Amino acid sequence: MVNNPTSTMLNKAAPWAVFILGIWLVVLRPMGPHWEFVPGDLGDTRFNNYILEHFFRWVSGADLSYWNAPFFYPFKNVTAFSDNLLGSAIFYAGFRWIGLDRETAFQGWYVFSFLLNYAAAVYVLIRFKFQPMSASLGAFFFTFGLPLLEQVPHSQLLYRFGIPLAVFYLWQFFEKPELAHLASILFWIVWQFYLSIYIGLFLSLVLLFYAIVLPFSIPSITFKELLFIWPQKLGQAWRGAKPIKKLLVPALVFSLGACLFALMAPYYSVSRYYGFARPFNGVLIPSLQDYFGATHAQIWNPISQYFIQNSGNIEQQLFPGLAITLLIILGIPLYPRFKTSTIAVVNLLVPILLVLLTINVNGKSGYWLFWNLPGFTSIRVVGRLQLVLMWPTAVYITWIIDQIRQINLQKPIRFFLVYFLVTGLLLAESTFFNYFVYSKIDAQRQLNVLEQKIPTSLPPNPILIVKDTTSVEADFTQELNAMIIAQNLGIPTINGYSGNFPPGHEKPLFCSSIKTKIMQYMAFENITSKSFYQETIQRIVPIGFEDCDPKSWMQYP
């Protein structure tokens, strides 16, 4: 098989072929032949599009402050109410700079996330000495697997290319301690935080468990050696470094720490200022049956219905797929090889340990052990940890495929049979999927209806507020419509939607809501000046309200 030109060609071409199939069938096809459908929904997806557009406007000079996005006006630092997308927003801005409209630029940003995730996964798996054919399947699962597709409406979670790279350099540092490897670990961790704070926190947790499990792979290691293994490796890296690296690497580490501080400081400030806090009983922790949930996968929907109670909750859909499950079972006969393979043992143990520690059993979970760690009190959905655990799982199934290949070197037809069956099943699971998409035309039609109601003559420094006509409490479509229209006009809006809400926030259902919102802000900021109220109310542009008497607004309540 090694010397067979056909096998060699297939081996080298596999990563490209698998990626093309994945990007076409799973990513491009659902958007339609003319990209008329946007992946996601009218809620979180459009909010992320708003934040990306805000970044573009900020770097273009149209918006003066990045952290003070002009929604929930006049509350401050509202960008830090949710993910900021700073790590990937430059890609969106690039699509805007070449002339694409906001929705098409968002689609380009979406597609680019799959490209970067797949490229990082393939690169690392091949650096781990796996064959390209094996690496293509692990990279496919990491990039296009079912748990990721379930989270498409939460597009802030899509960019995950920092995960394989951070894990790889931790592994490299363990095997060959060098300051450059340490700097690389921190670089990818920090970038992943900039891509998504959620994923950055979970990546840090997964790296911690890699650091705990890796030393156990050393034969006959003592308990004392386990305790001091990482300090010893740090010392070894420092002693082996050239003088120039002893200057540059600490400076880089300090700079990366400063970058992380600059990212997290607004969130810390906002949580203290607004009193954002989430009780432990308000955290959504997955139960065992959730790991069998895949109700949007057409193949497994009937089976998933038997396992999970809330089939509509995408946060509960954690089933990795039958292809992955079968590969893990196929790995059982490989036990003699498994127990001598550090990469197999570690990448199997890490997800098992973390699933066991974060699972909900009769209302109890070991997740409380991590609850008081910095940043983890802001996490609402623990099941999103699966998006990071997909990486060690991808490494493990890549190892299994690689072992099957080595066993069948003399009979390659067996390996090709397994490879193409697994590839076909992976593709089928991710292709026959009820994708989350919405129509560009329908979304624009909603905006056009509101835009036609905006008067041609606006007051100086106008503030937009749109009546919310949605009957469902959790439906923030109209709030997002108002945000987008205001953004297009370059004016602030009292409407808003985010991961958190300012004090006393309610949907504006009546004209009296306008006064109430201004008074709530004044009470929160301890503003007692009547002139502030009057100056603010004169700037209001109400849309959709039928019970408003602008003359009465001037009367201070």
Image (tube, rainbow, N blue to C red):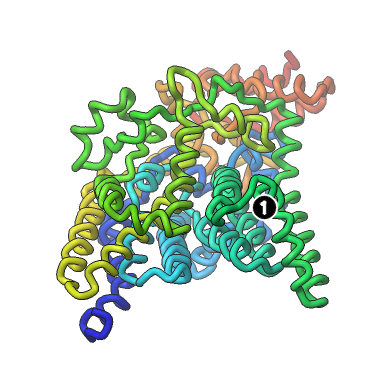
Residue at (15, 70) in percent of width and height = 413
**Which residue: 75% across, 30% down?**
272
Nearer to the camera, 239 or 364: 239
Residue 316 drawn above or below residue 253: above
Residue at the image position 65 percent from the left and 61 percent from the top = 187
Vertical placement of 527 versus 41: above or below?
above
Residue 337 seen in render: yes
Residue 381 or residue 339, whichever sits in front:
339
Task: Give the answer, above or below, for where 494 lies relative to 19.
Answer: above
What x and y, as percent, mark residue 364?
A: 50, 20
Q: Is residue 366 left or right of residue 69?
A: left
- Of the 4 image quadrants, the one containing the C terminus is top right
Q: Quadrant of residue 491?
A: top right
Counting labels gives 1
64 above or below 384? below
**Which residue is labeled 1 in the image?**
63
Rendered residue at 21%/39% (across/down): 300
Give the residue furthest to the top. 557
Q: Position of residue 85 (x, y in %)?
A: 58, 51
Q: Nearer the viewer, residue 117 or 400?
A: 400
- 136 displayed left or right of 116: left
The kind of residue on which mark 1 rests is Asp
Q: In what element is the residue under mark 1?
A: loop
Quadrant that contains the N terminus:
bottom left
Task: Estimate the x, y position of residue 320 in percent, counting from the top left.
Answer: 33, 44
Left/right of residue 289 with respect to residue 301 in the rendered view: right
Looking at the picture, how far across and down is residue 398, in whole percent?
Answer: 36, 60
| Residue 196 in view (yes/no) | no
Q: Label 1 crowding class (10 Å Cα cut-off): few <14, some 14-19, many 20+? A: some
